[in-house]
Image (spheres, rainbow, N blue to C red):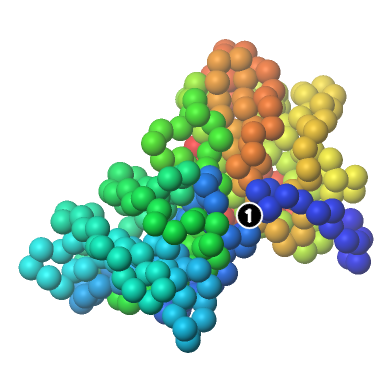
Amino acid sequence: MSPGESLDPLPDTLILQPPVFHPVVPYVTTIFGGLRAGKMVTLQGAVPLGARRFQVDFQCGCSLHPRPDIAIHFNPRFHTTKPHVICNTLHGGQWQAEARWPRLALQRGASFLILFLFGNEEMKVSVNGRHFLHYGYRLPLSRVDTLGIYGDILVTAVGFLNINPFVEGGSEYPVGHPFLLESPRLEVPCSRALPRGLWPGQVIIVRGLVLPEPKDFTLSLRDEAAHVPVMLRASFADRTLAWVSRWGQKKLILAPFVFYPQRFFEVLLLCQEGGLKLALNGQGLGATSLGQQALERLRELRISGSVQLYCVHY
């Protein structure tokens, strides 16, 4: 696309907010499109050795005076004789009844990955891959448009994602693996070995940012003979996405084109019996057929093109 060309409008559900790396705390940011059921926020970092407390607030605005309502206040406290977590809601300047969890899943001096998963009626929280708590909404989730992080916490990355749409490949919590920006950085082209091939239930996760002047993007799976039975290709010239067979035949994927310059993206491939299911930015987009033996013979995942990669996981 040309430098001055305008972007086609996309539904809010297909636009992912880019991750933020090493924010200075206190940190306040707008949540693009606000919160809704089906979104999740990931927070990775570490708790300082001398930490007393920190809080993550999902706020209804960012004004200083008057203080905005806080729909969800997540507050780990380490300085008491029995470390614990408080969740609460601030409405009209008044705190409501506290909800307390006595067993703190976070430790001073330790790193963490916290996942906030927003459902229809409640928020669930996992810490380092394990369920920790759930908190029912006391204010409408649709009012939340701001994330605030305060207190004794070192944050390496904040991510904004959609829930994994693949029920078959999921568990209570969807794929919330950390973003990778630390050294060594992920170089493009990027190659990852698949020593045992792919098996049903396995999910490949690719997250990244499209470069300012993109030319192409390709995700391919190669077998023992270096054949490419699976290739996903985004064409920036005509804004199409397609499966490409090993013989070069294209099968267009009918979906809005999400690979725009300087926009964040997430590709999920779920392996199932008979092929691979595809999701882009949390939206399921059908499947491509491939026999189980062919899936087991796959040996390499390769990513190339005009992108910066933040996460490759399988």
Q: Name the residue carrying label 1.
A: 16
- Residue 137: where, in percent of width, then height? 40, 53
Kind of element beneath mark 1: loop
Q: Residue 258 or 11: which is nearer the viewer?
A: 11
Residue at position x 84%, y 27% from top? 250
- Residue 42: where, in percent of width, then height? 45, 56
Residue at position x 72%, y 62% from top? 262
Q: Is residue 243 above or below residue 31?
A: above
* Quadrant position of the N terminus in the picture: bottom right
Q: Dot 1, how many residues are within 10 Å of its Cα: few (below 14), some (14-19), or many (20+)?
A: many
Location of residue 130 by image quarter: top left
Location of residue 93 by image quarter: bottom left
- Residue 222: where, in percent of width, then height? 65, 29
- Residue 189: where, in percent of width, then height? 67, 49
- Could you tell whether 149 is left or right of 96 in the image? right
State whether residue 258 appears in this view. Answer: yes
Q: Is residue 45 above or below residue 26?
A: above
- Could you tell whether 152 is left or right of 160 in the image? left
User: Extreme bottom residue here?
Assistant: 65
Q: How many labels, in total?
A: 1
Residue at position x 84%, y 40% from top? 240
Residue at position x 44%, y 71% from top? 69
Mark 1 residue type: Leu
State whether residue 182 appears in this view. Answer: no
Q: Residue 249 or 190: which is nearer the viewer?
A: 249
Location of residue 269 by image quarter: top right
